[in-house]
Image (cartoon, rainbow, N blue to C red):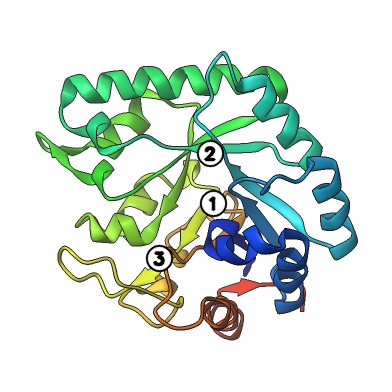
Amino acid sequence: MAKPISIQLYTVRDLAAQNFPETLKTIAEIGYKGVEFAGLHGHDPKEIRKILDDLGLEVSSSHTPFPTRDNVSQICDTESILGNTRVISGLGAAEFQDRDAVKRAVAKFQEACDLVKPYGMTFGMHNHWWEFVKIGDAYAYDMVMAEVPEMFSELDVYWCAFGKADPVEIIKRHQTRIPLLHIKDGLLKEGEHIHTAVGSGKLDFPSIIGAANDNVLDWLIVELDASYGDMLADVKKSYEYLTSSGLGRGNK
């Protein structure tokens, strides 16, 4: 069954910084069913929640600062107001360089899971390409996933592929732990990050989305790190590709 489409609002960060409520309205008008937050651009979460409700937008998830004892109550209180239960963050490349680094990463991820749990939240890892460095015969990503069973994965399929891993293989291996996919496309050029509208790059989305467990996958979340044309046009094109191909569904 086609999954609902959300958008990581980092994609439209420039527009959101100028007028966040109007940007949310534009996203809803395109047809997106949900949004994934990456900050509120100085707005009160209660104000944003009302706007979402008025527009018929759901919250698929949020990228937040990495949860610590000092910030977890602020993070989770905000997310609760927004109607979100999935808190997502990640770690830098230095945290995945070798076995000792991965052990430290595991401890941080486990603590994040433990910290958000009392608030009725779950914690997920968002990846870049550096989680797919091989340590011995295993990807650092696989090692972390094995050691933190409570954590879910929001797999960024573009960065996975850029890191020389096969997104289809990774998704199949961790099907029960991937409720969210970051649907991002690009040209996959060595050493270059050239992003495109979804469906215009090198990734095989029918195979990628088809590899997910239909009973676990809840959202397809479009994210464009950059646009080499008009970002809003690429956001529309990405939505149209997913809906016209039957891979995703929106509010239209």
Q: Position of residue 78 (x, y in %)?
A: 73, 33
Tell me the number on the disc at residue 180: 1
Q: Are marks 3 and 1 in contact (CB under 8 Å)?
A: no
The first of marks 3 and 1 along the sequence is 1
Residue at 71% across, 51% down = 59
Mark 2 surroundings within 10 Å by alpha-carbon count, few (fewer than 14), some (14 through 19), many (20 or more): many
User: Residue 7's quadrant in the figure?
Assistant: bottom right
Q: Seen in the image, is 39 located left or right of residue 228?
A: right
Which amino acid type is marked by label 1?
Answer: Leu
Which amino acid type is marked by label 2?
Answer: Ile
User: Residue 118's quadrant in the figure?
Assistant: top right
Where is 79 relative to 202, above or below? above
- Mark 2–mark 3 Cα distance, whole angstroms, equals 21 Å
- Mark 1–mark 2 Cα distance, whole angstroms, equals 11 Å
Mark 1 surroundings within 10 Å by alpha-carbon count, few (fewer than 14), some (14 through 19), many (20 or more): many
Q: Seen in the image, is 44 located left or right of residue 119?
A: right
Q: Are marks 1 and 2 in contact (CB under 8 Å)?
A: yes
Q: Seen in the image, is 24 located left or right of residue 208?
A: right
Residue at 63% across, 46% down = 61
Q: Residue furthest left?
A: 136
Which amino acid type is marked by label 3?
Answer: Ile
Where is 83 relative to 202, above or below? above
Tell me the number on the disc at residue 192: none
The first of marks 1 and 2 along the sequence is 2
Q: Position of residue 107 (x, y in %)?
A: 37, 17
Residue at 31% across, 36% down = 92
The residue singled out by tag 2 in the image is 88
The first of marks 2 and 3 along the sequence is 2
- Mark 3–mark 1 Cα distance, whole angstroms, equals 12 Å
Tell me the number on the disc at residue 208: 3
